[in-house]
Structures are given as C-alpha cells and as structure tokens.
Image: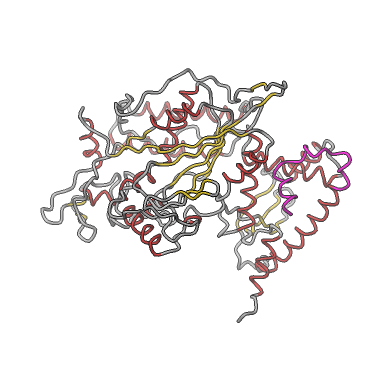
Amino acid sequence: MRKPLAKDALKQLAESHGVCVRPLALRRTDTATGLTEVVEVPCGATLAVKCKPCAEKGRRLRIQQIREGWHLADEPAVRPDKPDGDALALVRVRAHLEFEREAVQYQPMTPDERAAQVAEIDAAIAELDEALAETSLRGQLTPKERDERPRRKRSTRRRQDSPDLPRLPVDPRTVGRAYSGRTGKTHRPSMLVTLTLDSHGPVHSHLRRGAYVAPCECGTRHGPHDDVLGTPVDPAGYDYRRAALDAIHFARVLDRWWQNVRRAAGWNVQYAGAVELQRRLAPHAHFAIRGTLPRRLLKQIAAATYHQVWWPPFNEPVYRVDKPPVWDVDRQAYVDPKTRKPLPTWGEALDALEEPDSRPAYVARLGRIDARGIDQGTRDAERSIRYVTKYVTKDLTDQAKPRSDPQKAHFDRLHAELSVLPCSPTCANWLLYGVQPDGVKAGLTPGRCTGKVHQRSTLGFTGRRVLVSRQWSGKTLADHRADNRAWVRAILAGGMADTEDHDQAADDADGSKRYRFELARPEDPDVPPLEHRLLRAISARIRWRTDLDTARLRTTAITPATDQPAALAAYAVEK
C-alpha cells in the first residue's frame, strides 16, 4: 500500500511540465476539405484544485497583465475598429424591428392579435440578435430581457453621517504624475493599496514589528501559528450578523470606492487587484494603482465610502426555519401557516420604502486602508505583484481554512449566519422575514438557498476575485496570450524578425470560418483514453520546451532580453 499509484505519478509528471491534467477532446471539422479529427484543448481552470497547470498559467498571465500596466508612461492606445457594412446592416434591420414592435401597441386590434404579432416580432428579434452575436461587434446591442416595470429611483444625496468628498471633473488621462529627482532622474511611482472592512469585534492576532511581538487584545503574545488566531476574543459579543452582511455587499462597496476615488482625484485612476480572506474570515482586497494619490485623501475617501441596501427590513426573522410559510396553490403565493393570509409581495414591500422617512435595510462601509508607494523596476514592485496574485489559484476559503476547534467554531458560526440572511431579491430566505421573494415560485426552502453567498467555499463574497480596470494595459487576456504566442513563433522561426506573414497564414488556416468544433464524447471510438492523451501531451511539451530553449540560445546574440514577454521570461526563470 505504500507504493505510489501509477495515475498519481502520471498526474505529477504532467503538472511538473505544465500539461493540463483535464484536457477537453474536441472534434474539429475542416469545412474546406471535410477532414474531421480530434484535437485537445486545455480545460482553462482557474483553481489549482481542479487543474494546477492551467491555474498556474492563468496566474502568470495575470502577473504579466499587472506588470505591463502598472507603471505606464504613455496612455494605453485603445482604438476600436469601425464596424463593417454587414454589422451596420443588421443593426439597421434591428432598428426597424424595434420600431414595428412599438407600433403594434398603437394599432387597433384585439389583445390576442396584438400578442401574436408581438410574439412573431420577438422571434425575429431573437434570430437577428443571434446573427449580431456572430459579427465582430463587442458586447450586446440591447439588454437580454425586457423589463417593462417602472424603475425605482433613489435619492443620490449623501448621508449626513458620512464626511463630504471633493468632487472634481474627471480628466480622461490614466497615467500618473512624474517627478524629477535632484540628479535629474525622472520617477513615476505607483501605489499598492489594501482595503479592509471595519472591525466586527476584537479577534486574536499576531502583530510583529521586527523582533517585537505586540500583545493581543486578550493580553497574550500569540505565535504565528497559534490555534486561536482570527477567532473572536469574546465570541458572544462578536457581531456575526454585520460580518456576514459586509461580506455579502463587499463587492458593491468596492465599486463605490473606485467611483469616489476617480471623482475625488480628478483623473481616471486605473487599478488591478484581487480579493482574499483575512484570518478573521472577512474579505479584503489588494490593488495595484497606476500613479500616486495622497494618503490623506485615500483615508478620507475610505471613510466616506458606503453602500446602501434598499431592501425590505430583515432585522428580525418572523418565521422559523422549521416552520416557514407554506405555498398556496390556488393563490400562487406563500401564506402564513396559521392565518392563511398571503405574505406581502416583493413589489408591495418595496412600495413601503417610497415613504420620505424610509431608511435602507443596511449600510455597508469600509474600514482600514493601507497604502504605500512602489517604484518601477524594483524588487519591491515584483514582490508586490506576486503578493497580489498569491492566492488567485486557490478557492476563497482555502488560504483561511480552519485548523483548530476554535477556528472551526468561528467558521461554522459565520456560515450559519449567512445561511439565514437574504442574498438577493430572489432569495428564498425572504420567507423567514415575512416577504415573498421576487419572482416567487413553489418549492422555495428558506435556510437552503442555492445561491453562492450561502456556500462554505465563498463565505458570503460572490463578486469577481480578480478586478482589473478597462484601461489598465490596453489589452485583454486574449491579447496577452496572442503576444506570447507571437513571441514563441518568432523564436522558433529563428529570430525576432518580422513574422507577420507567418502569423497571418496561421490565422487564415485556423480561422473560425473554416473550422467547426464540437465536443467529443469519451466513449467515441476515435477518442483515446485520457492516460494515453496525457502521455502524448507530456512528450510533446518536453520536445517543445527543448526546441524553444535551443532557439533562444541561438537568437540570444540578436535578440535583446526586453523583447521577451514578461510572463514567458518569468516562466523560463522558474523552469
């Protein structure tokens, strides 16, 4: 039993050479020749627990993206191409259909005839939207669903308990200021900012300042691996409800934070960062910011940033989990189990918030902010980039998994609070607070909502883990991948010469118009077993790596090191 398994050895070898351990088998059909063959593509997983090579590849790509956009001296050139004639023709037809759909509402006809014509026009619109999705247009022309309900408007006046912020006209520039030193050297520093939530109660912590270890709130100097780190000093007095609500709405607070930063700074501040969990199981975010801002201004913005949750009140539950409201088939609504009266609908509950003295159900705020300057090309800059992307390949709770009984009790208590709080207007937990969820239907079970907020792997946070602004580097991840592929092609071709003709020929040969792809089934006779495919992929990767290293040595004399993409340079150093 102590002998290693053969499959584990195969997986370990694949991971050591960066080969995907869960490749997808696709059936590729050449529409020009009719040739059909099975090709493999990486699974593209972002978590190391699913596929470590793909997750590590994505992390290196994020490192490259942050490195290229952090200390830019010139504005990133983002100039979209003009739409072609075919796309404009489809948009013109789409406009006519929208006009006809609105005109049907004013034509004299019976309701059944009007509904039939509207359904016919909607079918044509859906077909046309599919054709628009296949064009070169980016994004969607119209929203996916038509929401004809009146939009509720809220006051935009600032809360009286929040400090005012300076509001300047936002300059379109994205590059920070440059400073000249005494020796005439120009410095263009940037910043690393950490945003955390407010305290929900004192917790056991390990604070080290050099060789000195500061005492905790409990008066004890804890070690770095103490079993009580991150747990409340007074579990009975810890505000678990506020901790859970802050985790649920942390993503919205971050969005409001960046809106306030740009308005107060007066220019289009760009950022790239990631969200992680602290030891106390509260989410916090690390951001690389291009340019510098005064620390005093950043602290003022953090103190003035908040997000108001305009939901019906949910301070105290009206029903218990074991005795929730029941579904009435005749009324198509949930009713009180004793009085048989229907609960207020979601629209009725929101109508009650239209009163002038109404208050939001909850207000989420930021807590502490740490900011420091980072110079370009220093070890601190590279170390900060890897610090930001350290946990992007892990699940949110992986780096904060409980190890001791007090930590497990703290984790379970927070998860229990999240399981009974509403996560969205459609959450089944609204039944516990006497309100029918939006889009109510039969079969809702309060306390067992399937939303990601209530899962143990998220602990309330369901926003994007990696946050990158639109004009950070002027490139998407696909653009960075294309840069890396172009560099590899050039190296294997014998030098960093112009390979535009080669790239164009490859794009034409593998273009999306020529090939059709479909997912192949593992039981298909022409699909080899996974183990055979992994063995071939490992051999191909080893041969490819040998050829690439040989080509790099051959072109070292004519290729400067700065022409190599940063992600590939880091990968070569690691290997």
Hey, which residue is sitting farthest top in the picture?
169
Using the image as rendered, state which of residue 533 and residue 14 is in the foreground: 14
Quadrant of the snapshot with the C terminus: bottom right
Q: Residue at x 42, y 54 (%)?
A: 230
569 in the magenta segment:
yes
Could you say where residue 214 lies in the image, as x and y percent from the top left? 46, 48
Residue 81 visible here? no
- Boundaries of the magenta span: 553-575
Residue ranking furthest to the bottom: 1
Magenta highlight: main SS: helix
Q: Does residue 429 appear to the left or right of 487 in the view shown? A: left
Q: Residue at x 46, y 33 (%)?
A: 142
Q: Position of residue 378 (x, y in %)?
A: 68, 37
- Left or right: 496 in relation to 519: right
- Of 476 and 69, nearer the camera is 69
- Residue 9, given in percent of the width and then of the height, sits at 67, 70
Q: Residue at x 30, y 38 (%)?
A: 112
**Residue 150 seen anywhere in this rendered image of the structure:** yes
Q: Quadrant of residue 347?
A: top left
- Within the image, what quadrant is residue 505 found in? top right
